[in-house]
Amino acid sequence: PIPIRTRAPARGDRKHALMEGYEQPGVGDYYLKPRASRKSVLIEPYAYEFEGRQLLMTTLAVPVLDGGRFVGVAGSDLILAELQQQVQAIRLYDSGYASFFAQGGTYVGDRDAERVGRQPDAAALGMDAAQFAAWQQALHGGKPFVTEVDDPRLGSRATYVQVPIRFEGLDTAWALATIVPTQEVLKDLHALQ
């Protein structure tokens, strides 16, 4: 085990403990990824129980180097609840909405809160297998993605536009997607003619 110090900013509580599992892929990614890459990393969101509540969090972890030699990690856990609330409030045209994804595909924010923390499949996004594969490739590669889908939540054809959101100093890109019924977009175009 390695020593860890934590502080809850709102209350100022400080805790000292021994961290276990840091050498285990998955649970230990906050330690293993910056150690291997020697770069700062933003960990894929994960569920964490705190004071009886399940929270969706991510960790920003920075390697601590001494003359190029890895000596540890400094990090900060970030609760993503406020981000979910902001994405949930986005309305586009009459019935369009937004979704926010981490690079690995986890919903970070969505109009439907129950999707947060999960990963979609092709059917959930209204995509066929080829579209879904292209979506995954764009998401993992931090690239824009545009397609037309049969959105199951809107019950209609929709224009799906996804743009990468980059974080300065990190190789990670998350993505904001907008989903708008195609007929609502075309209605405005026809009005301009």
Image (spheres, grey):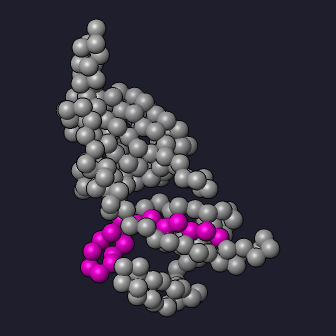
Q: Quadrant of the N terminus?
A: bottom right
Residue 41 position within the rendered picture, expressed as x and y whole percent measured from the top left: 58, 62
Choose between 10 and 137: the one closer to the eye: 10
Asked if 38 appears above or below 14 in the picture, the reply is above
Can residue 118 be seen here? The reply is no
Residue at left 36%, top 84%?
Answer: 11
- At x 47%, y 49%, the residue is 174
Q: Residue furthest right?
A: 67
In percent of width and height, residue 146 lies at 43, 30
Q: In the picture provided, is 154 more to the left or to the right than 167?
A: left
Specify start and end residues of the magenta stretch as a single range.
Answer: 46-63
As for residue 49 lying within the magenta part, the answer is: yes
Q: Position of residue 58 (x, y in %)?
A: 45, 65
Where is residue 187, by image quadrant? top left
State the residue in front, 12 or 154: 12
Nearer to me, 5 or 151 = 5
Q: Quick check: is 86 in the magenta stretch?
A: no
